[in-house]
C-alpha cells in the first residue's frame, strides 16, 4: 500500500455548503490537524516508505483517529498506537475505533464537514 493512500473509510463525498459555515467553526482544529497530517503524509512519509507493521499505517491511523474523534482524543489514540509500534510488535490490522455518535461527513480529501442531511447521530462514513 502506498503511503499516500488512505483506507476507503477515511474518504467521503461530503462538501462544505454555505449553510454549514457556522457549523464548521468547531471543526477547524480537527481540520487543521488533518492538514498537518496530510502534509506529513505527502512529504516525510515518502522518505520512510512502506515500513509499518500495521494496517493502516500509523499516519493513516492518525488521520482516521482525528477524523472520528477530534484533535485531542485522536492524538491520544495515535500516541497509543505509536507506543504499540516497536520491533517486537506482531502487527496486523488495527483500525481506528468508531466514534459512537459521529455526525459529520468527510470530503474526498479526508477533511471533516458538517453533515448536510442531518442524518442519525449514529451515522458513520465507515463501510465495513
Image (cartoon, rainbow, N blue to C red):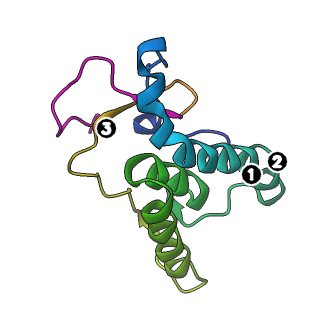
Residue 43 numbered mark, or none = 2
At a point 46% along the width and 38% down the height, the residue shown is: 10
Q: Earlier in the sequence, mark 3 or mark 1?
A: 1
The residue at which mark 1 appears reads as 40
Q: Residues within 10 Å of mark 2 (few under 14, many from 20)?
A: few
Q: CA distance from mark 2 to mark 1?
A: 5 Å
Indicate the position of residue 93 as horizontal and vertical percent values.
40, 60
Q: Quadrant of residue 122?
A: top left
Above or below residue 101? Residue 44 is: below
Question: Which stretch is magenta?
Answer: 111-128
The residue nearer to you, when weighing 90 against 10, is 10
Horizontally, residue 24 falls left or right of residue 2, namely left
Residue 60 image offset from top left, x and y in percent: 55, 51
Q: Is residue 98 visible?
A: yes
Q: Are marks 2 and 1 in contact (CB under 8 Å)?
A: yes
Question: Is residue 89 located in the magenta-colored stretch of the structure?
Answer: no
**Mark 3 element type:** loop
Count of marks overlaid on the render: 3
Distance, label 2 to label 3, CA atoms, is 27 Å
Can you tell which mark lies on residue 126?
Answer: 3
User: Decide: marks 3, 1 in contact (CB < 8 A)?
Assistant: no
Which residue sits at x=81%, y=55%?
Answer: 44
Amino acid at each position: 500500500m502506498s503511503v499516500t493512500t488512505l483506507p476507503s473509510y477515511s474518504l467521503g463525498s461530503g462538501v462544505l455548503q454555505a449553510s454549514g459555515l457556522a457549523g464548521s467553526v468547531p471543526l477547524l482544529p480537527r481540520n487543521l490537524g488533518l492538514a498537518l497530517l496530510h502534509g506529513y503524509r505527502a512529504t516525510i512519509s515518502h522518505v520512510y516508505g512502506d515500513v509499518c507493521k500495521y494496517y493502516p499505517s500509523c499516519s493513516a491511523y492518525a488521520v482516521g483517529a482525528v477524523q472520528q474523534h477530534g484533535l485531542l482524543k485522536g492524538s491520544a489514540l495515535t500516541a497509543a498506537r505509536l507506543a504499540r509500534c516497536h520491533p517486537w510488535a506482531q502487527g496486523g490490522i488495527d483500525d481506528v475505533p468508531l466514534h459512537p455518535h459521529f455526525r459529520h461527513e468527510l470530503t474526498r480529501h479526508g477533511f471533516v464537514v458538517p453533515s448536510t442531511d442531518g442524518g442519525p447521530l449514529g451515522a458513520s462514513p465507515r463501510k465495513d
